[in-house]
Amino acid sequence: MVYTLLTKKQLSSFLQFALPPMINQKTSQNAISAMSRLAELYAVRPTCTLSSREIAESRNLPTPIVAKILTILSRAGYVTGSPGPGGGYRLAKKPSAITLKEVMVLFERESESMCPFGPGWCGNKEPCPLHDTIVDMEKRAQKFLTKTTFAAFVKGAPSVPITSCQ
C-alpha cells in the first residue's frame, strides 16, 4: 500500500467533506435544540406544555421553523400537543427513551462517507490513506448518537425557568 502526503487542497477537502459535524443539517440541530428544551421541561413538570413560540424564543430559533419541526416530531410520536393559540407541546416519552439518532434521522438522510481524495479513489482503488480513520470516526459518531438520549440535557442542568405552563 502506498501512502502519500496530503496537499493543502486535499487537506481542505478532507476537513470540509470527510469530517462534517456529527449533526450537519441545520434542521436537525434545531430539532435537537427544541427537544432539549422539552426534555428540560419534562424533568421539572412532565405534563406542562410550551408553545412553539416559547420553545423558539428559549433557544433563539425562528418560530415558524420550530412549529414545522414540532409537527414532524409529533407525527413521529416524540412530542404530543397541538399548534395554534392555546396549544402547546411536551415530550410524549421520557427523555431517557429518545435518542439523538432517532430525532436526527427524521431530518437527515444517510450519506456515505466522502473520500478526501475525490469520489473515484476509495471505491475504485485501494482505500485512501485516511479511509480506516474516517470509517472509525463515523462509527464512533453513530454510536454516540445512538447511545445518547435527551436525558443528557437534563443531568446537572440548571433549573430552567418556566414562564408559562399550559
Image (spheres, rainbow, N blue to C red):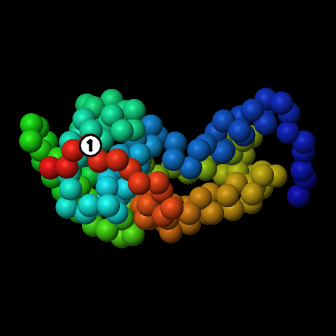
Residue 95: x and y in percent read 36, 65
Examine the image and state in which quarter residue 26 appears.
top left
Residue 102: x and y in percent read 38, 60
**Could you tell me which residue is drawn at 56 percent across and 63 percent down?**
144
User: Which residue was labeled with disc 1?
Assistant: 163
The residue lying toward the viewer, choosing from 59 and 141, is: 59
Q: Residues within 10 Å of mark 1 (few under 14, many from 20)?
A: few
Q: Is residue 98 above or below residue 61?
A: below
Examine the image and state in which quarter residue 55 appears.
top left
Q: Is residue 10 above or below residue 98?
A: above
Residue 134: x and y in percent read 70, 54
Q: Please state, as top left, top right, bottom left or bottom right, where the N terminus lies in the image.
A: bottom right
The answer to whether residue 67 of the structure is visible from this angle is yes
**Could you tell me which residue is drawn at 41 percent across and 46 percent down?**
33
**Could you tell me which residue is drawn at 78 percent across and 52 percent down?**
130
The answer to whether residue 65 of the structure is visible from this angle is no
Examine the image and state in which quarter residue 56 appears.
top left
Of the residues shown, which amino acid type is indicated by label 1?
Answer: Thr
The residue lying toward the viewer, choosing from 51 and 123, is: 51
Residue 97: x and y in percent read 36, 70
**Could you tell me which residue is drawn at 78 percent across and 35 percent down?**
10
Q: Is residue 91 above or below residue 118?
A: below
Give the total of numbered labels: 1
